[in-house]
Structure formats: structure tokens, C-alpha cells
Image: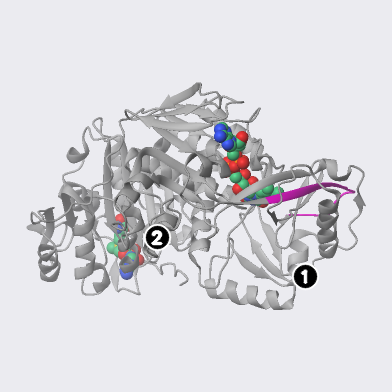
Amino acid sequence: MPLHTAILIQREDGAPYSPDFGDVYHSSDGGLAQARAVFLAGNRLPQRWAGRRLFSLLETGFGIGINFLATWQAWRGDAARCQRLHYFSVEKHPLTAADLASCHARLPEVAPLAAELQARWPQALPGWHRLAFDGGRVVLTLLFADITEALPEIDAGFDAFYLDGFAPARNPQMWSAEVFRECARLAAPQATLATYTAARAVRDGLAAAHFRCERLPGFGHKRHRLVAEFRPPHWHRSAVAAAPVPPETPVLVIGAGMAGAAVAENLARRGHPVTVLDAGAGPATGASGLPAALFHPHLSPDDAVLSRLVRSGLLLALRRWPALGPLPGAGDGLAWPAADSGEESSMRETVERLGFPADYLCFLERDALRQRCGLPVAHGGCWFGGSGWLDPRALIRAQLAASGITPRYGARVERLKSGNGVWQAFTAGDDLLASAPLAVLANSHDAARLAPGLCDLRLIRGQMSIVGCAAPPLHSAIAGRTAVIALDCGLAVGSTFAEEDLQPAPRAEDRARNLAALRSLWPETPLQDRAGASADFVGFRAATRDHLPLIGALPDLAAVRAQGLHWRGKPVTKLPRQPGLFGAFAYGSRGLAWASLAAEIIGCHVDGEPLPLEHGLAAAVDPARFVARALGKGIVP
Ligand SMILES: Cc1cc2nc3c(=O)[nH]c(=O)nc-3n(C[C@H](O)[C@H](O)[C@H](O)COP(=O)(O)OP(=O)(O)OC[C@H]3O[C@@H](n4cnc5c(N)ncnc54)[C@H](O)[C@@H]3O)c2cc1C
Ligand SMILES: C[S@@+](CC[C@H](N)C(=O)[O-])C[C@H]1O[C@@H](n2cnc3c(N)ncnc32)[C@H](O)[C@@H]1O
């Protein structure tokens, strides 16, 4: 399960070499020249992307990123470039940041681009990493996984393929019939492919997958290389991304909490005019109004779906937030002390088993953890580097400011109606509030009322206490049985977790519970508890039964019902959808982890772009999953 970074040797002739594969990363006749001659020219680039709104490329083997840098450089220099370039690349053994930098030092021609790539180079964590360059017009998605696992998880159409594994004889996994079949599945109409090799097995394998190959003179000392066109038989169904809406299609976002503000910011950045409606008197009047919220990974020994999703969301958010300017909070580490010695040893085992980079996650024995977090914790536990807390109210304000949107407050949507390709939002008095061809429900548990029948949402009351404390020695935020965060106004402690409790006002007994939890972590807390419960924050989390949010296009229940059990057993992603209606809600206790990911998923759905996460993870948050599960049990929802 852990990723193994590449072992790389710089050969005397300047070509980086992999001792594990017994091959060089690029031709000794020049990496950039090879990229241009073999991969770009072999796919007739830049000509083929000219004037396109979107052009998508898939590479097998990211390596040093020379092909990417050459492609990005060509895109930058091309006056007729496509508006958005999506570059997907699969890599099982990412380079360490130091090796990447030392290889790039030999590429002065692309130095500024290489510097940007190095600055954003992800930690060696399994999964997908989406990096945006040039204001999001060049999007690099790095799939850190084995090729055989990575390709089946992609759900998109690609216009061009770069096949760049090590030599087929030394790296057969990268040239298998399965890989070629996957390329065919992922090929958009008129897709092309290029590779530096003309090995017989590769030619035959590609031909069997309906790529019509041509052998051309090779680059440098190579005799031949291959270019190919995808020529599928008539029955082949091309992998075409869902038809995007026209650019600048207006969008209505309902809700100005963490969910709505992130969606609005993403769509506005993509050029869509966005109207935000919120029932409250200002932004963040719901659960997102808490004074401080933690963000950190979720851990499970088998790196389960929830853990992978949270990681995906967190990494995306951590790349997005800095663009919003300084936000109140801290992201330089968070401690999760074990509650007892049993939990301590299972944490130790899990951390060891996952083998993640230590600057992302490590296990610290009690004294080391005490030193890091500043509290006299009773047990060792996890240290999450790069995790921490932030003030969600400030985040939401920054997102709205960045997108230039002033939400309409006091605008409660009582009813949504669609007709003639437009979604209309009405008040309780049946006055039209706003309308747009696209609508996003980001109004937490109330979304289930506006779009009934999708799922049951649980409401979970939470009370976070703000307590005075003389000079707390806290060096980092603490998570676990109770969260502790040092704010200017005191310590934020909590939170309680109570289902079916609709009391909106803070309660003294809940505050007492939070303080007791704090004392069990830190018996000698020098509390100055003058304010009492009135200082506390109360909010309501909306959660599903499977603890995952609903993110994506909302299913068309009328269409499903009309066809009885027709959709039973079909993949959830294939269920019919309501045109132009999306959801981003049920974030439970993880608003910060879901919000940026949800916004990018919805942005990609709207613009017909490849999603930022694996098919299996997208299906896990698909708003149609409860409908699909009901059908699976023979129940028409
Ligand atoms: C005590 C507590 C502690 C928490 N701690 C953390 C934490 O440490 N880390 C973390 O990541 N998450 C935490 N959470 C969870 C997090 O707060 C939520 O997941 C997140 O705020 C949900 O955001 P949202 O935008 O979906 O919902 P909300 O913030 O509730 O926003 C929904 C918005 O929709 C509006 N609205 C509702 N209905 C309508 C309508 N019909 N028309 C118009 N507008 C409407 C509301 O006015 C509201 O502004 C905590 C939650 C609580 C309660
Ligand atoms: C020739 S190098 C790629 C060079 C790269 N395209 C560039 O521009 O720098 C081949 C890459 O394939 C990767 N690779 C090898 N086997 C793999 C596998 N099974 N799955 C995914 N990547 C693999 C290697 O780690 C290596 O980085």
C-alpha cells in the first residue's frame, strides 16, 4: 500500500537512470527534444488543440515531468491554444522533491515552469493530486498508483495519449494488453497516441485495441517510434465527457456556508455568473458559523474509502486556500493523542502500516507528542503535519470576496421549480427570488426538503465551548475525543455530538461536559471560566447514514420511478439526472475536508471536465447512491 519513491541515478551522459528498471528516464539525446519530437509532434500538437475549449491528455509514467513541461511550454507559446488543458499522468514511483529539482536543474530551457512544478510537487501519498497552473487553465492530475489500478478509476475521454513507460522488456506492466484496452476505453473520438518505442508487442497490442499504428523514424539513436490514431469499430462507445454547458452559463447557489461559498468561488473562477441565496442575515449563519474548525486526515488501517476521500479533499483544499490570502488559523501540525494504551498501539500499527511521509503523518510517543502540542497528554498518538485549524467564517468571507459575489441574504428558498431549462427559486409567498439554468443545493439538511426522496439526513447538534484560560501552553491544535484550539479569545473546546436534539441555545450541562473532557486531557487547566455557556457556539451537522456527503448531479427520481426496477444493478453513476441540478451537502463533521473537493467536482461536471478523484470515490459520494441501493434491494424509491 505505501508508495515507494523512485531511486534515481544521474548517469554521466546526463540521462537520469532507474536501477530498479534498468533503464533511463529519457533518451540520452535530450529529454525535451524527445518530448517535442515523439510525444507532441506524434500527437500533432499544438495544432490539434487549436481553438478548442478543452483538450485532455493522458500519460503513462510521469517520471521527471519532462513531457509535461514541454507540453505546458508549447501551450503557453501557442496563440491558438485551447482554453483549458487537462494533463493526467500515472506514476507509481514519484520522484522525491530533491531528485525532481536536481533533474530539473539540467533543463534551463523550462526553468520557470519547472520551478512552479517543484513548488507544487505533492507529497508521496497514494491517490490523485490535482495541481493548477496558469490560473487553472493548465490542470495537472497526478495519479500516484500502479498503472493497472489507476486506469480503471478514470472516467473521462482523452484526446491524446503519451505512452512513456520504461522499455517494454523491462517494464511490461506499462505495455500490457490491459493498458491498451483501457486507453481504448478512455479515447475520445479522433484520439491519437504516440510513443518512443516501436516494439512489435506494443504495435500488436495497440492494434488489437483499435489503434491504427504507423511506424516513423525514431528519435535520436532509436530506429523507429510509433504514432497511432484511434479507429474503433462501429459498435465502440467513445469515452466522451458529459456535454458541458455553454461557457458563462449562470448558476444559482442556495446556501452561503462552507459548501455554498466554495462552490460559488469555484464556478465564478471558471467564468460562470453566480447568484448566491441564503436564508440567514449574513454569511455562515449555519453550522459554518463556528469560530474554529479542525482539518486533518482520517486514518484507517486499510486506507478505506472515507480515509482516501478525506485525503483527496484535504489535499485539494490545502492547495486552494493559500490563493485566498491569509486566513486566521494554523496549518503547521495537529496532535491526536490516543485515549488509552489500546488505542495508542493500534495508532502506532496503523501509522506504520500506511507508511505515509512523516511530514504528513507520524506516530509520536507520549513525551514527543507532549513536546509538540504543549499539553501533558497521557499517551502518545498521531502527529499530522500540515493539518490544523482555521476560522470558517473568514474562509467563507474570503471565498465570496475572491469571487466578487455578494449573496442575497434573508432569501429563504421555499420551493424550486424547473421548466424550459431554467431552475426557479421561490419564497414562501411564491415570489420568484432568482432563476438560472444551473442550480446547486448547498443548504445543508434543508437540501433534503428541496430535493426530497434522495436520502434520510440526520441532524446532529454540536456545542463548542469558548473558555477563558490563562496563557495556555498549547503549541498546536488537538483533535481526538475532544478538540482544543487556542484562539485569541480563549480556548475552543468540544464539541458535543447529540442526535435528535434541536435545542439551538447553548446549554450549561453541555459546556460542563466539554470542560470535563478538557480536564481529562489536561487536568491542571488554569481555566478562567467567567463567560459561562453564553459564549458557546451551537450548530447542527447534517449527515447521511454512510457518513459521506452528497456531491454531484442530483438523480431524476421521476425518471427512475417511471421505469420501475429498470436501473437495478446498474452502476450508480449511470442513473438518470435532473438536468442542471447539483447538490453539495451533508458534510457532517468534515465541512473543511469536503468543501473544496465538492466545489471542484461540481465545477468539472458543469464544464464537462475530468473529475479530480477516482471513479470509486466519486461513486461513494454520488447523490444517487441511496436510490441505487434501494433499487438493489428491489425497492423503487
Ligand atoms: C459544533 C460543531 C463543530 C464542528 N467542527 C468541525 C471541525 O472541526 N471541522 C470541520 O471540518 N467541520 C466541523 N463541523 C462541521 C461543519 O461545521 C459543517 O460540516 C459545515 O459547516 C457544513 O457546511 P454547509 O455549508 O453544508 O452548512 P451550513 O453552514 O449549515 O450552511 C447552510 C446554509 O444554507 C442556508 N439555507 C438553509 N436552507 C436554506 C434555504 N431554503 N434557502 C436559502 N438558504 C438556506 C443557511 O442559512 C446556511 O447559511 C462542526 C460542526 C459543528 C456543529
Ligand atoms: C520513462 S519514465 C517516464 C518519463 C516521463 N514521461 C518524463 O517526461 O519525465 C517511466 C515512468 O514510468 C513509471 N512506472 C513504471 N512502472 C509503473 C507502473 N506499473 N505504474 C505506474 N508507473 C510506472 C516509472 O516510475 C517512471 O517514472
Image quadrant where residue 137 sits: top left
> Is 474 included in the stretch rendered in magenta?
yes
Q: Which mark is residue 635?
A: 2
List x then y, in percent, for residue 11.
Answer: 33, 66
The residue where tag 1 is placed is 367
Is residue 574 visible to the viewer in this orientation of the structure?
yes
Q: Which residue is nearer to you in this view: 245 or 67?
A: 245
* SS category of the residue bearing label 2: loop
Residue occupying image coordinates x 77% and y 63%: 371
Q: Which residues are magenta?
A: 461-476
Position of 221 relative to 583 (above/below) = below
Instruction: Give the quarter the ligand 1 occupies.
Output: top right
Residue furthest to the top in view is 431
User: What is the three-letter code of the residue carrying label 2?
Assistant: Ile
Q: For the residues carrying marks 1 and 2, which lies nearer the camera in this image?
A: 2
User: What is the three-letter code of the residue carrying label 1?
Assistant: Asp
Position of 234 relative to 370 (above/below) = above
